[in-house]
């Protein structure tokens, strides 16, 4: 079989029929456009808050709205692309994204900024599956594998550049010029789109509106539920919860209802497939165990990446009291490693099977997380910590590119848009779950650890603990804790003991978080072991 596949498959054609990389430059920049926009939003929150006279929590609604729009609409966007034609709709939504950048630059109220990001999210919901479909349309074999790998490297490159460029502009000029960069990127992508192979679309494709509402509602509820586990409460409703259910938090209820809606979506999708009607997404792309294993592996690695991206900045900015620019410098070794690995991993596809690469990569991420749990301190500039982040970045960069490539190469070209929509849905949901669950675990562990430690420190009487409520202090730096304690009748010795206790429990919580992630990484070897044993060039078209 391998011999026949090599004679007729993508690898053989790729050897004799190579295309210019000019179209891929446009697709690469489209991924940069989306990722740069996402990375620029957190940097801009302070400036938007000052300009619009709103608190950062209100300005952060721009991030929430963008993510929800992408996650809820990506499957519908994929079907719309199949109907209209990928090149045509790609150009249209690129113009829409450019319009959202103009809205951000000219917005006079926070409502306009939120509307701008809703528009950007809706455009990205079509760009995400379009990238996969257009790569499948324009490249084959080794070129296709390289093109897929470039999307993973584009995400890391964008995050790195957005922090550096956005941090500099935000500090010395203002937040609005940051979105001038996204406008320039959108214009460049639109111009380069004319190098793409044209397609006419299929007017016979029908969009299942009911399924679209089911999956959209499921993703919105799951994302809101997981993202607000900390703020609204894991079990009991907190004061910040928008409402309560007999005193219980709405966050877990959102998760449960989201899961139910997701199951109804799958039931309806399979039913339409049996009836010979167009489903919103063709589940044939997940028919084989190897393809389902790729999705599971993608979910795990993206969730772990999100957990790291939450944990490290939290400690650097909140615990150490450093700036976002300092955070970008501290994260640069990790982001740079992901960028380089995602680009170069395709060179190993000819030598090793996807299963072998995935098992090695998950083994590397497991070892890296165990190493971080062992060596991490409250100072991130130590060489052992940097080495641990680099090792994790190598495994993460290899896995994101690999599992995505497995899905793209295994599916027929006409289902490439469905692969893209599944990728977008999986990554957005995994990012929300990884961030929320890691946050919930760390906060709960810290609160429990501080409470237990206070009971073991006789120099910290119960009256003082009640005044400060140390168990609910969350992650706080030493200076802020001193100010908090200054409002009580604590003595200097008690302040010193409280700070020492807080430092110890913060570090213990961090180490436990890395240990838990290492366990998740080790368990992920199970789906990774079910990835294909073939090489990309051995897959028949």
Image: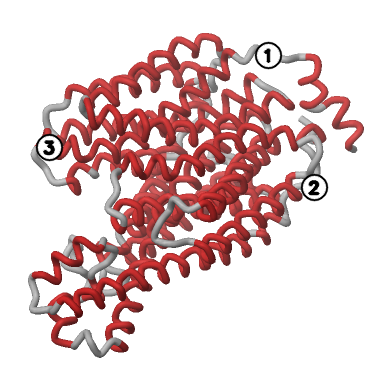
Q: CA distance from mark 2 to mark 1?
A: 28 Å
Reading the image, the residue beneath label 3 is 50
| In the foreground, 378 or 415 | 378
Instruction: Measuring from the top left, give residue 434's x and y in whole percent.
Output: 44, 56
Q: CA distance from mark 3 to mark 2?
A: 55 Å
Q: Secondary structure at mark 1?
A: loop
Q: Quarter holding the N terminus?
A: top right
Residue at point 76%, 30% (across, down): 541
Q: In which quadrant of the rendered view does residue 164 lie?
A: top left
Reading the image, the residue beneath label 1 is 19
Mark found first going from the N terminus, 2 or 1: 1
Residue at point 59%, 54% (across, down): 296
Q: Secondary structure at mark 2?
A: loop
Q: Secondary structure at mark 3?
A: helix
Q: In this rendering, would 312 be left or right of 495?
A: right
Q: In this rendering, would 25 be left or right of 291?
A: left
Disc 3 crowd, CA 10 A, few/some/many (<14, 14-19, 20+)? few
Residue 73 vertical placement versus 100 (above, below): below
The answer to whether marks 2 and 1 mark residues whose Cβ atoms lie closer than 8 Å is no
Residue at point 58%, 38% (across, down): 419
Mark found first going from the N terminus, 3 or 2: 3
| In the foreground, 164 or 5 | 164
Q: CA distance from mark 3 to mark 1?
A: 49 Å
| In the foreground, 77 or 242 | 242
Mark found first going from the N terminus, 3 or 1: 1
Q: Nearer the viewer, mark 3 or mark 2?
A: 3
Residue 329 vertical placement versus 23 (above, below): below
Instruction: Measuring from the top left, give residue 69's x and y in whole percent.
Output: 34, 39
User: Is residue 270 among what the camera can see?
Assistant: no
For residue 533, which numbered disc appears in the image? 2
| In the foreground, 425 or 485 | 485
């Amino acid at each position: 079989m391998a011999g026949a596949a090599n004679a007729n498959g993508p690898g053989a054609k790729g050897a004799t029929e190579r295309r210019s990389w000019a179209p891929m430059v446009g697709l690469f920049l489209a991924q940069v456009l989306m990722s740069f926009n996402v990375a620029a939003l957190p940097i801009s929150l302070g400036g938007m808050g000052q300009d619009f006279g709103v608190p950062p929590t209100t300005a952060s609604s721009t991030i929430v709205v963008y993510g929800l729009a992408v996650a809820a609409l990506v499957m519908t966007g994929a079907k719309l692309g199949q109907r209209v034609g990928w090149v045509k709709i790609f150009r249209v939504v690129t113009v829409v994204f450019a319009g959202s950048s103009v809205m951000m630059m000219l917005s006079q109220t926070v409502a306009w900024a939120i509307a701008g990001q809703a528009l950007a999210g809706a455009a990205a919901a079509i760009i995400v599956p379009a990238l996969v479909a257009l790569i499948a349309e324009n490249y084959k074999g080794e070129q296709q594998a390289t093109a897929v790998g470039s999307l993973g490297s584009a995400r890391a490159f964008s995050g790195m550049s957005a922090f550096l460029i956005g941090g500099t502009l935000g500090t010395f000029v203002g937040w609005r010029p940051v979105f001038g960069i996204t406008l320039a990127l959108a214009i460049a992508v639109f111009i380069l789109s004319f190098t793409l192979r044209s397609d006419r679309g299929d007017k016979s494709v029908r969009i299942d509106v009911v399924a679209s509402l089911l999956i959209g509602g499921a993703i919105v509820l799951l994302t809101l539920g997981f993202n607000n586990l900390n703020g609204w409460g894991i079990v009991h409703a907190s004061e910040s919860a928008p409402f309560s259910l007999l005193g219980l938090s709405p966050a877990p209820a959102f998760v449960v209802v989201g899961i139910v809606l997701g199951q109804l979506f799958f039931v309806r999708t399979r039913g339409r497939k049996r009836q010979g009607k167009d489903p919103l997404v063709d589940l044939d792309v997940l028919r084989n165990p190897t393809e389902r294993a790729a999705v599971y592996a993608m979910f795990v690695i993206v969730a772990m990446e999100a957990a790291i991206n939450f944990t490290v900045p939290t400690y650097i900015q909140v615990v150490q009291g450093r700036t976002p620019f300092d955070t970008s410098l501290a994260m640069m070794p990790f982001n740079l490693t992901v960028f380089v690995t995602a680009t170069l991993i395709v060179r190993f596809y000819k030598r090793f099977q996807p299963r072998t690469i995935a098992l090695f990569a998950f083994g590397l991420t497991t070892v890296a997380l165990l190493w971080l749990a062992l060596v991490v301190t409250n100072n991130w500039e130590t060489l052992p910590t940097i080495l641990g982040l680099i090792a994790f970045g190598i495994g993460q960069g290899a896995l994101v590119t690999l599992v995505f490539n497995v899905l793209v190469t295994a599916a027929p070209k006409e289902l490439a848009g469905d692969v893209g929509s599944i990728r977008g849905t999986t990554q957005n949901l995994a990012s929300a779950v990884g961030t929320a669950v890691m946050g919930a675990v760390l906060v709960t562990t810290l609160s429990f650890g501080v409470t237990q430690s206070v009971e073991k420190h006789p120099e910290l009487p119960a009256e003082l603990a009640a005044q400060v409520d140390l168990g609910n202090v969350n992650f706080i730096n030493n200076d802020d804790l001193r100010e908090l304690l200054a409002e009580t009748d604590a003595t200097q010795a008690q302040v010193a003991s409280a700070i020492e206790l807080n430092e110890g429990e913060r570090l213990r919580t961090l180490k436990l978080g890395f240990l838990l992630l290492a366990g998740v990484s080790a368990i992920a070897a199970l789906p990774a072991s079910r990835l294909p044993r073939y090489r990309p060039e051995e897959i028949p078209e």
